[in-house]
Image (cartoon, rainbow, N blue to C red):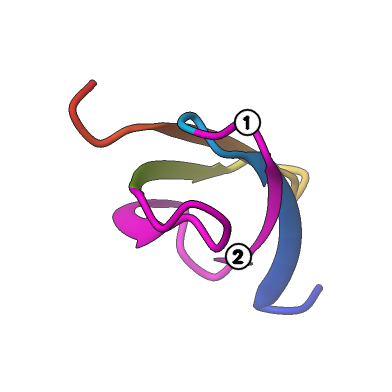
Amino acid sequence: MQALQEQSVMCPYCGEIIEVLLDASVNFQEYIEDCFVCCRPIQFSVYVNDDGSFHVDAVDENA
C-alpha cells in the first residue's frame, strides 16, 4: 500500500467533489485544507481502518 492515496471528498461549503491526498502511514489525523474550488477552509478528520481504507470527515471549519 502506498503511503499517500488520493480520495474524493465533497466540500461542505460549495458541494463540489475535490481530490485530496491522504497519508495512510498515520492512523488518525486532523488538519485544515482550503477547498480547491471555493477556497474556504475545510476541517478534515481522517481515520485509517484496519483494512487500509479511509474514513474521512470533511466539515465546515466552524462546525
Residue type at tag 1: Gly
Instruction: Say which mark, if any, is on residue 27.
Output: none
Mark-to-mark CA distance, 1 and 2: 25 Å
Circle 2 — which element?
A: loop
Residue 21 included in the magenta stretch of the image: yes
Residue 53 as seen in the image, left or right of residue 63: right
Along the line of sight, the residue nearer the viewer: 28 or 60? 60
Along the line of sight, the residue nearer the viewer: 25 or 39? 39
Residue 37 included in the magenta stretch of the image: yes
| Nearer to us: label 1 or label 2 | 1
Which residue, given by chain and number where applicable, does mark 2 sit on? 24
Along the line of sight, the residue nearer the viewer: 38 or 3? 38
- Count neighbours of disc 2 (C-alpha within 10 A) and say few if under 14, some if 14 to 19, many if 20 or more: many
Residue 6: horizontal and vertical position, in percent? 74, 65
Question: Quarter of the image containing the C terminus?
Answer: top left
Along the polypeptide, which appears first: circle 1 or circle 2? 1
Residue 36: horizontal and vertical position, in percent? 55, 63
